[in-house]
Image (cartoon, rainbow, N blue to C red):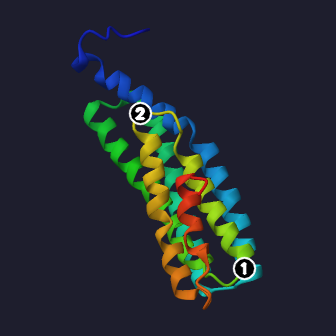
Amino acid sequence: MTPDLSSKNDNEPFIRRELLGFVLGHTRTAVLGNLGVALVTITVLTVSQPSPLLVLWALAFGLLLSIRVVVSMRMKSRLGRLDLHGIERYERTLTVLIGLNGLTWGLLTWIGFNGHDPFVDFYTVAMLVGMTGGGTPDRQHGIASGRHHGCFCLARPMELRGIRSSSAAGQPAVKQPECAARGSAT
């Protein structure tokens, strides 16, 4: 049944329920993708530069991802019975969980990028830009420019650590993460 779109108030719960259902329908793919990249990242960082912070990161990441799975499964099963207030509450909850998941990826930059191992530094930059790029579709309203600003901000830890650990020659590598994150060729 297609709703009559002439009245925003009458159709808002239907539309928002459908949109939330669409997002929840992608939870399995998002979780499996996050888990796969996290396992590869943990392996790369453990082999190249073991750190107790990596264990803390993995525990926080696993906990947040587990909470996201449980909450998303609950939301999906109850979605059809929710009124507008319930839908808005679930939207906020899901936004916070996805945001915290993104924050864990951003914090990983402080563990992985140290300016000493070019392979690990490159992997960290590629992983960060890839996870950020994969998490935001390119052609949605306002998100394309927002994605570039988000990548730009997430590159700051790499810049700061690169400045602190750069060689006496003042390598221009400090600027590479910023340019890679913005997608520019300079």
Residue drawn 51% across the image and 38% down it: 24
* Residue visible at 48% across and 51% down in the picture: 148
Under mark 1, the amino acid is Thr
Q: Is residue 5 found left or right of 183 in the rendered image?
A: left
Q: Position of residue 137 (x, y in %)?
A: 53, 39
- The residue carrying mark 2 is 141
Residue at image mark 1? 46
Closest to the observer: 69 or 129?
Answer: 129
Is 132 positioned to the left or the right of 99 in the image?
A: right
Q: Secondary structure at mark 1?
A: helix
Q: Residue at x 57, y 52 (%)?
A: 183
Q: Quadrant of residue 158?
A: bottom right
Residue 18 x, y percent position in the rendering:
43, 26
Q: Residues within 10 Å of mark 2 (few under 14, many from 20)?
A: few
Residue 117 location (% of width, % of height): 71, 81
Q: Residue at x 38, y 54 (%)?
A: 96
Mark 2 element type: loop
Residue furthest to the right in view is 47
Q: Quadrant of the C terminus?
A: bottom right
- Tell me the quarter of the picture where residue 43 sits: bottom right
The amino acid type, in three-letter code, at marker 2 is His
Say whether marks 2 and 1 touch (CB < 8 Å).
no
